[in-house]
Image (cartoon, rainbow, N blue to C red):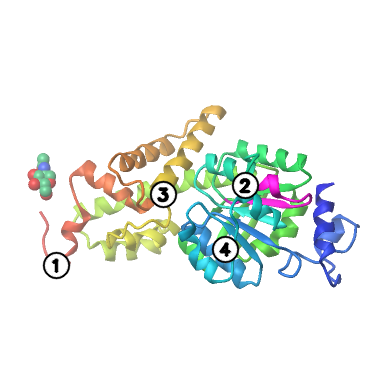
Amino acid sequence: MRLLSLLCLLHRSATHTHSPSLFLRHHMATAAEPVGPSNTKLGWIGTGVMGRSMCSHLLKAGYTVTIYTRTQSKAESLLSMGARWAESPKSLASQSDVVFSIVGYPSDVRKVILDPASGALAGLRSGGVIIDMTTSDPSLAVEIASAASAAGCSSVDAPVSGGDRGARLASLSIFTGGDETLVTRLTPLLNHLGRVYHMGGPGKGQFCKLANQVTIASTMVGLCEGLIYAHKAGLDLSNYLNAISTGAAGSKSLDLYGNRILKRDFEAGFYVNHFVKDLGICLRECQNMGLALPGLALAQQLYLSLKAHGEGDLGTQALVLALERLNNVSLESGSSKSLSEGKN
Ligand SMILES: *[C@@H]1O[C@H](CO)[C@@H](O)[C@H](O)[C@H]1NC(C)=O
């Protein structure tokens, strides 16, 4: 049984066994220490905006972490914190008990985890665990879970929400899909990154993240439309955002992105390109489910228009640009005027 092999693996290097963990109530097998820096070696694949912050928390918590990323220069800050470098996901996995991945697209997930020649699963010892934190296809998460199981390993899909700030502050929401006992066992590890929610079996973490993206998509449209409206109506936008933030229109999206929009700071915490990918996965799933979500479709079309204007590498808050173009207005034009000045 895969869970037990994980246990044995962890137990092998454990020095003390004293913790009456929740785990023991489910399995009367050998007492095992909770996952910790002394008994669990980590691998980390993908050091983009999110991955870099997240991985740094695990290094700071004292874990031995081996990293792999497509562009080695993006890993320098982590290497200087003591992370080790691996030449491939496979080589990384051969040095790890638990392998994390957070990469761009489902095709990247497939490559770094399932590629027979260089993928992580090919290098992972029996009993190892793969945690994919990329927002990806639920069906791919199920496929990875089967492949892991066939290799005597296990996997958890664990996409996150909370943006670059959540990653930096270790306050992410982590939506997990996989064996519940395993997720419970991994929770102390994942708690270095944020709060863990178990949503069900393989793929259910991804479904939760996609529903999360459906919600955010229309929230962002609402936030940007409200700003365009307030601007046209001659309101001071900073004052406006401050006023609505504590009322029913307040939201995490407003807190995260409102001021960045006013400052024309479109740097990516979360890339438009990645959001278009997520919304595309959602729409395909909707098609499979026979589900009509017009708000999602509208948001996806607006975000696609950003890509068409070469703005795919901006952050999701750049949605305001699409609405500015639709209306031939710019929030910028009024920002220097004082409150008392009239508008035409
Ligand atoms: C669009 O905005 C520009 C710049 O403010 C302005 O010069 C132009 O007249 C506007 N177009 C229309 C049709 O109002």
Q: Which residue is drawn at 54% across and 46% down?
A: 135
* Tally of numbered discs: 4
The residue at 36%/37% (across/down) is 301
Between disc 2 and disc 4, the foreground one is 4
Secondary structure category for the residue under label 3: helix
Please tell me which residue lies in front, 81 or 85: 85
Q: Comparing marks 1 and 4, which lies closer to the viewer?
A: 4
* In magenta stretch: residue 130: yes
- Binning the other alpha carbons within 10 Å of mark 2 as few (below 14), some (14 to 19) or many (20 upward) gives many
Q: What stretch is highlighted in magenta?
A: 120-133
In terms of image quadrants, where is residue 82? bottom right
Which of disc 2 and disc 3 is earlier in sequence?
2
Q: How far apart in space, not on screen, are marks 2 and 4 (Cα)?
A: 20 Å
Looking at the picture, does residue 61 appear above or below residue 311?
below
The mark found on residue 55 in the picture is 4
Residue that carries the numbered disc 1 in the rendered image = 340
- Give the side of residue 234 with respect to residue 45, left or right: left
First in sequence, mark 2 or 4: give its number.
Answer: 4
- The residue that appears at 82% across and 68% down in the rendered structure is 14
Residue that mark 2 sits on: 205
Estimate the x, y position of residue 129 in percent, counting from the top left.
Answer: 71, 52
Where ligand 1 lies, by image quadrant? Answer: top left
Cβ atoms under marks 3 and 1 closer than 8 Å? no
- Marks 1 and 2: which is nearer the front? 2
Give the amino acid type for the residue marked by disc 4 in the picture. Answer: Cys
